[in-house]
Image (spheres, coloured by chain):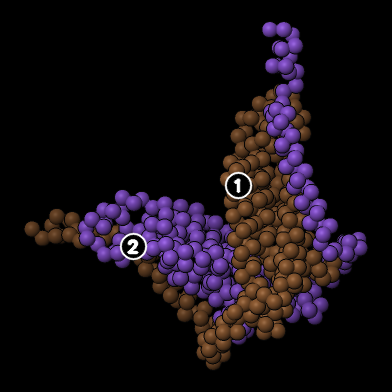
Chain colours: A purple, B brown
Amino acid sequence: MTVDQHKSRYPEVWRRFGPRETLIRYAWYLGIVFVAAASLSTLDITWVYLLDAHVQAYDLLERMVPPDWSYFDVVVGAMIETVHIATLGTVATLLIAFPVAFLAARNTTFNSFTWAVGRFILVASRSINTVVWALIFVAIFGPGPVAGIWAIAARSIGFMGKLTAEAIEEIDEGTVEAIEATGASRLQVLWIGILPQVLPVIYGTTVYRWDINIRESTVLGFVGAGGIGILLYSSINQFIWQQVSVMLIAIFGVVVVSELVSATVRKKIT
Amino acid sequence: MSEASTGHPTVWRPPKLIENPVLRYGLLAGALAYLVWSLGALEIDWARISVGLPRAQNMFERMIPPDFSRWELLVRGITESVLIAFAASFAGMILAVPLGLAAAVNLAPRPVYLFARLLVVLSRTFHEIIWAIFFVKIVGFGALAGVLTLVVASTSFISKMLAEDVENMNAGQAEAVRATGASFPKLLTYAIVPQILPRYLGVSIYRLDANIRHSTVVGIVGAGGIGQVLAASFSRYDYDFSLAILLVIIGLVFLGEIFSNWIRKRLR
């Protein structure tokens, strides 16, 4: 082997990628930057507003302190309502999501039409944001917590249903076959063969979704669907920032606690 | 021989999740009591609810068929939403790198770590709509507020995932590179980046998908995108136009999900 050959095979500096790979990588990076830059420049943005943003933000913060703690009593009631909306919405989801998941799982659905229906329900439910669902349910049930509960449920069905359907598709078919062999009806197979296998997933995702729903239910009030959002929106619109800061602290506390509860319960289950 | 003498039950029962019957029924009773309490505590206007079903029927009748005649408005809104999502995802990707490294317990000094974690928790706690309201107050109505909102949400999400990946990485590789006397930037490029890059890109793409979903609502509080058009159509009872918008959003989110899954599969 000549010195040149040796040099090209064992270069002085080690590189992870060959020249071709490096080129392709940089082309990707350039492409990503280009898309981002093109997006920003196409958007109709008044950049001047960004110049004094820090002044505005500081001004806002200054108006928020000290928090007006006399407002706290009102906030507690609204926060309890917020938690109720999230919890009841999650309970409603639990009842609806399982049948839909059953339709949307390939191995338990009746035929390809019911499968498509199940999948469409899941996709539609997940695509539409909770707040948009709230707009719809406020138009139906009028402003108030009931619209919020249904909005939470409508959005969560897609989330829980998708995860449950995936769990159903991954069950141990042996158990199902064994129960079918005893002459069990379809319902019995479902109840004894499938449900126990996916229960841990259902419990886990329910608690996880409940935690997300608490966060979502804090803003439902912006469109009139109950909870702390109603108070928050009215205080913001009246520029009563010292009440706003009390509510933000309350939301922070409740969300952190619910996250801890959800993490502890999920650790215990799995 | 009776059943009691052998101690073997003759009827099979599936095993219970919670073995202790007191705890099991206690939890059930607690759940029922909660349902009664919460339903009683909520101020529910049953008279208004009872007219809900006919109203829903009326609403669906007015929704169908969806009205695509104002498609220019629709396309402009959707494009704005998608652009907001792209711009915010990119900015979030970049900002999440320092924040994510600072939030990794095995890399950052204690005070830096705690501060970074506090930032992540703070921005995750508040819903995007709350952030959007504040950004609208700070920079005014329009797409900029939407971009900033989603930048905050994306940064905290990606950096949380990034920090977890750095904490779970193979420490041996980092130690080996450190043992060669490598500086911190070299440690990053040779030991840490190769280990976490695929996951980081995957999480970023997932976030792009999530941002597309969220960019459709920030407009409800005036932060740009299709949400503004949607909220306006609802308040004007233009339900046929609302349905058209909703169908387009569903289609867009569906495409975004397919795109995100395809890329993430290729990354692996």
Question: Are the two marked residues, 2 and 1, in contact with CB atoms closer than 8 angstroms?
Answer: no
Name the quadrant containing residue B177.
Answer: top right
Q: The N terminus of chain A is located in which quarter?
A: top right
Which residue is farthest front? Answer: B69
- In the rendered view, tell whether residue B56 sits above or below residue A39: below
**Residue at left offset 30%, top offset 53%:** A175
Amino acid tagged 1: Arg
Task: Return the x and y of residue A129 as percentages of the image width and height.
Answer: 62, 68
| Subunit that carries the residue with mark 1 | B
**Residue at left offset 76%, top offset 56%:** B87
**Residue at left offset 26%, top offset 65%:** A185
Task: Return the x and y of residue A8 as percentages of the image width and height.
Answer: 72, 16
Name the quadrant containing residue B235.
Answer: bottom right
Image position of B105 (left or right of B3) = right
Marker disc for residue B264 = 1
Q: Is B236 in front, or is A256?
A: B236
| Subunit that carries the residue with mark 2 | A
Q: Disc 2 to disc 1, how far (Cα)? A: 34 Å
